[in-house]
Image (tube, grey):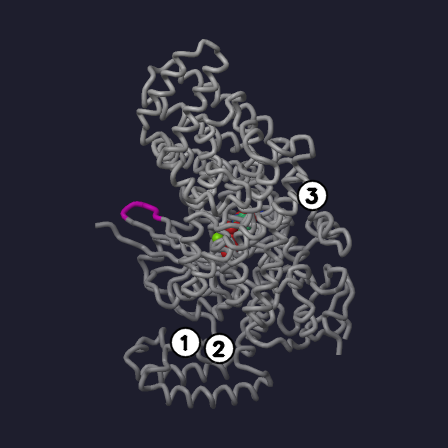
């Protein structure tokens, strides 16, 4: 039997907790240079000698007085879960602020290791750290690390094992005598209850109660000792508050911790904060009162230009490879079902979606740079005033912009918003931020209809209008359903960091793998289903009739026309054709034929399926066969007005099943779930219809 | 009484008192903006609605409402 050691990785946000775990193991935890990257706990397992080490990466938490839902996850873990060792990661650059929280952790009195991360940045500034002095003052082991350069991380494991074998060290950090005296008094009362027998637990609870921690208060609320504790507490609050001349004991403890931390930093770290660092120089520009916003908009615009223009070349090549392969195989393989499924079903579908991989990667690269460089929080700062007008706050920018990548993590990222109203509004409009999987549909339609009208700008316009529409809806929701002010805005702005090429390459590689896997499995299976549903049942009589007619004519053109007519008729009579005809009335006012209608509905499973379904349905014929590529087929079979209506539908209607599942998991109220499931589709249809009719009036 | 929102870019001051209510107050404290801490104004938006302040090597973005809830005095006092 191996010995299991459970380690909780705890620390303030953005100190490098996830990076440390990545450096220690082959985990691929998401890392980014802003607060609130990790929003749920993640477990990573390591083996060393006879030990199984279970590391739990927790969301960053500023203080035990948890503030946001994702911080609450970390707090709940610390208070209620079973773990052996606390690995407290701190940023050496901001040691004193980090230590304020460390002190709260030391109150728990578990085995604790202090990891001073980012020492590479201290070294660069020519600073030095007196490690043994910190160890002496805090009474716990200290390890200096750089997750970036993988320095010191191995020491973490050996220290964990070492600590596991010995009893917990004596507490060395004490507060002011006046506070300690109350703590001891209160702990004594708590020990009367069977829940708080041990000295450590009672002391910790006493401190939490003096800190006015609501969770701690709830824990004692139903116990027999409650009245006694409550009365003692009230008395202590009053006494301490007048002795220290502060409004609340929370402030007294905070000041105490801050003072101890500040002194400790002064005694142990020697570093000159250079004036005019690169970060400051960049900020002179990037968050300039006047230039800041235009620069941000320029970056966004440039990203979509690149997404389209740069992505266009490989897109055409990949598209051509797939269509050539499939026509080659169609002739080469023996005729039959297998041939047809492959060359009319799977290959066109998978090809239709894989050709957009380069575009998607460029978009993801842009979002990744936003996350890694530290510009994310600058953008949130710049957007705060603007978002405020729509009843949101700057922090909502992070989930909103993540929504351009994938809606699922974006819903999770909304956990960083404290106010439940802010959170639900943000989540309700997140679908308006078009995710990466919708990009192929836009690129397809834009290529088909705007090839000569600066397609990059059109793409930018689509994304911006979606975002703007989302904000308008947010405003409406705020005024109608969620009266009240948005939560205040307080957000840390990390220093700029140069992203590591390796990390970015890794991230894009993971995205590519996931994308190809999805294309090769889910999309391929969906395409097979679409093919079968649209090939059966076969109307033998009709086929015979047509074949006879085809035999009789000698005119080659006529023969081809008859063949196409047969294909189109068979497709229309197929199962899928019937389904399509059944739902088509809903979309008929938008000028959609049954193919577009089926594709839109199929897109509810995953947005990639819209394009892949179109790929299959147009490859199976019936549509004009003059051209090979999907883009030109779309151009010939869909009119301009309907294309615009389709873009609007795609932009607004419900996201994919995975995203909807995430929403349901995050929002427990049924009323919101139902509202969320219905309203985007209604808005999408109405808006698409309005625009379709307007375009018709304008003569398009 | 001077508040952070009265300061200009690049101006420095020392925190005297935080008037913000919990839990904002706790949040500011845990970011190191405590009584006696030195703060420096890095930037504010054009309408002075959102502020970026530096304290103890940590940059924090705040809204006007929060910035005006922090009383400061000159570093020379
Ligand atoms: N220079 C330097 N940068 C680091 C180091 N460790 C992490 N970083 C960077 O710091 C940022 C934050 O890293 P994360 O691992 O996401 O931090 P975290 O503590 O998990 O953050 P949250 O999940 O938001 O609480 C990223 O940009 C990392 O690349 C380090 O040792 N040196
Ligand atoms: Mg993390």
* First of labels 3, 1 by sequence position: 1
Q: Are marks 1 and 2 on the same chain?
A: yes
The structure residue drawn at horizontal position 59% and vertical position 77%, both measured from the top left corner, is: B21
10 Å crowding of disc 1: few (<14), some (14-19), many (20+): some
Between the residue at mark 3 and the residue at mark 1, the CA separation in whole angstroms equals 66 Å
- Across the whole image, how many numbered discs are drawn on residues? 3
Q: Under tag 3, what secondary structure?
A: loop
Q: Is residue A52 left or right of residue A229?
A: left
Residue A271 coordinates in the image, percent (x, y): 64, 55
Task: Name the quadrant containing residue A84.
Answer: bottom left
Q: Are marks 2 and 3 on the same chain?
A: yes
Residue at mark 1: chain? A
Q: Which residue is mark 2?
A: A211
Q: Which residue is mark 3?
A: A698
The residue range painted magenta reads A45-50
- Looking at the image, is mark 1 or mark 2 nearer the viewer? 1
Residue A78 coordinates in the image, percent (x, y): 40, 65
* First of labels 2, 3 by sequence position: 2
Between the residue at mark 1 and the residue at mark 2, the CA separation in whole angstroms equals 9 Å
Q: Which residue occupies the foreground of this view, A201 or A699? A: A699
Quadrant where the C terminus of chain A is found in the figure: top right
Vertical placement of residue A537 versus A201, above or below:
above
Residue A446 coordinates in the image, percent (x, y): 61, 35
Task: Name the quadrant containing residue A337.
Answer: top left
Q: Main secondary structure of the magenta part?
A: strand
Vertical placement of residue A630 versus B3, above or below:
above
Q: Which residue is mark 1?
A: A216
In the rendered image, is residue A16 in sight? Answer: no
Q: Which residue occupies the foreground of this view, A499 or A298? A: A298
Q: Is residue A48 magenta?
A: yes
The structure residue drawn at horizontal position 40% and vertical position 85%, both measured from the top left corner, is: A185
Verify CB contact (< 8 Å) between mark 1 and mark 2: yes
């Amino acid at each position: 039997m191996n010995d299991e050691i459970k380690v909780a990785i705890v620390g303030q946000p953005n100190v490098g907790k996830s990076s440390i775990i990545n450096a220690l193991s082959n985990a691929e935890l998401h890392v980014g240079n802003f607060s609130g990257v990790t929003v749920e706990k993640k477990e990573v397992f390591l083996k060393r000698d006879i030990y199984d080490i279970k590391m739990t990466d927790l969301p960053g938490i500023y203080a035990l007085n948890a503030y946001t839902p994702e911080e609450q996850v970390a707090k709940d873990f610390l208070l209620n879960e079973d773990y052996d060792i606390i690995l407290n990661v701190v940023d050496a650059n901001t040691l004193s602020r980090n230590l304020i929280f460390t002190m709260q952790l030391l109150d728990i009195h578990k085995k604790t290791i202090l990891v001073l991360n980012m020492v590479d940045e201290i070294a660069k500034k020519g600073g030095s750290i007196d490690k043994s002095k910190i160890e002496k003052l805090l009474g716990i082991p200290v390890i200096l690390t750089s997750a970036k350069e993988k320095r010191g991380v191995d020491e973490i494991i050996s220290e964990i094992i070492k600590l596991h074998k010995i009893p917990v060290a004596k507490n060395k950090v004490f507060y002011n005598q006046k506070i300690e005296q109350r703590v001891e008094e209160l702990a004594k009362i708590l020990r009367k209850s069977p829940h708080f027998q041990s000295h450590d637990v009672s002391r910790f609870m006493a401190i939490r109660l003096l800190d006015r921690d609501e969770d701690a208060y709830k824990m004692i609320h139903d116990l027999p000792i409650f009245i006694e504790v409550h009365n003692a507490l009230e008395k202590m609050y009053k006494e301490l508050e007048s002795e220290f001349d502060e409004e609340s004991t929370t402030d007294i403890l905070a000041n105490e911790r801050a003072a101890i931390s500040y002194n400790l930093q002064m005694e142990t770290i020697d570093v000159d904060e250079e004036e005019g660092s690169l970060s400051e120089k960049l900020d002179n520009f990037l968050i300039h009162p006047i230039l800041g916003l235009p620069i941000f908009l320029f970056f966004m615009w440039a990203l979509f230009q690149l997404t389209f223009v740069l992505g266009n070349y490989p897109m055409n090549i990949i598209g051509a490879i797939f269509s050539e392969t499939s026509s080659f195989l169609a002739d080469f393989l023996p005729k039959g079902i297998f041939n047809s499924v492959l060359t009319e079903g799977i290959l066109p579908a998978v090809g239709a979606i894989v050709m957009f991989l380069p575009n998607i990667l460029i978009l993801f690269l842009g979002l990744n740079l936003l996350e890694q460089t530290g510009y994310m929080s600058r953008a949130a700062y710049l957007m705060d005033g603007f978002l405020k007008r729509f009843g949101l706050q700057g922090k909502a920018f992070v989930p909103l912009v993540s929504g351009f990548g994938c809606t699922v993590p974006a819903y999770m990222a909304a956990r960083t918003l404290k106010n439940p109203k802010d959170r639900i509004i943000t989540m309700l409009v997140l679908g308006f931020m078009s995710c990466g999987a919708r990009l192929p549909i836009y690129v397809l339609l834009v290529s088909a209809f705007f090839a000569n009208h600066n397609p990059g700008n059109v793409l930018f316009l689509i994304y911006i209008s979606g975002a703007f529409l989302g904000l308008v809806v947010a405003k409406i929701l705020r005024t109608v359903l969620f009266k009240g002010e948005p939560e205040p805005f307080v957000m840390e702005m990390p220093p700029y960091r140069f992203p590591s090429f390796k990390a970015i390459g890794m991230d894009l590689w993971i995205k590519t793998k996931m994308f190809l896997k999805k294309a090769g499995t889910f999309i391929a299976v969906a395409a097979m289903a679409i093919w079968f549903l649209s090939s059966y049942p076969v109307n033998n009589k009709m086929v015979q009739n047509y074949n006879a007619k085809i035999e009789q004519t000698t005119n080659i053109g006529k023969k081809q026309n008859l063949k196409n007519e047969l294909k189109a008729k068979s497709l229309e009579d197929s199962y899928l054709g019937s389904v399509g005809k059944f739902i088509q009335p809903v979309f008929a006012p938008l000028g959609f034929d049954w193919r577009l209608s089926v594709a839109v509905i199929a897109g509810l499973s995953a947005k990639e399926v819209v394009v892949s379904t179109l790929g299959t349905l147009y490859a199976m014929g019936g549509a004009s066969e003059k051209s090979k590529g999907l883009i030109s087929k779309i151009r010939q079979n869909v009119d301009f007005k309907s294309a615009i209506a389709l873009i609007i539908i795609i932009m607004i209607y419900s996201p994919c099943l995975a995203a909807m599942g995430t929403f349901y998991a995050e929002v427990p109220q049924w009323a919101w779930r139902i509202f969320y499931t219905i309203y985007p589709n209604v808005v999408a249809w109405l808006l698409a219809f309005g625009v379709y009719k307007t375009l018709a009036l304008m003569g398009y | 009484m001077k508040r952070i929102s009265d300061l200009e870019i690049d101006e420095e001051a020392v925190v005297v008192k935080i008037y913000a209510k919990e839990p904002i107050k706790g949040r500011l404290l845990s970011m190191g903006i405590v009584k006696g801490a030195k703060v420096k104004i890095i930037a504010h938006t054009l309408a002075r609605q959102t502020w970026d302040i530096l304290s103890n090597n940590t940059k924090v973005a705040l809204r006007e409402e929060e910035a005006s809830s922090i009383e400061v005095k000159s570093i020379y006092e």
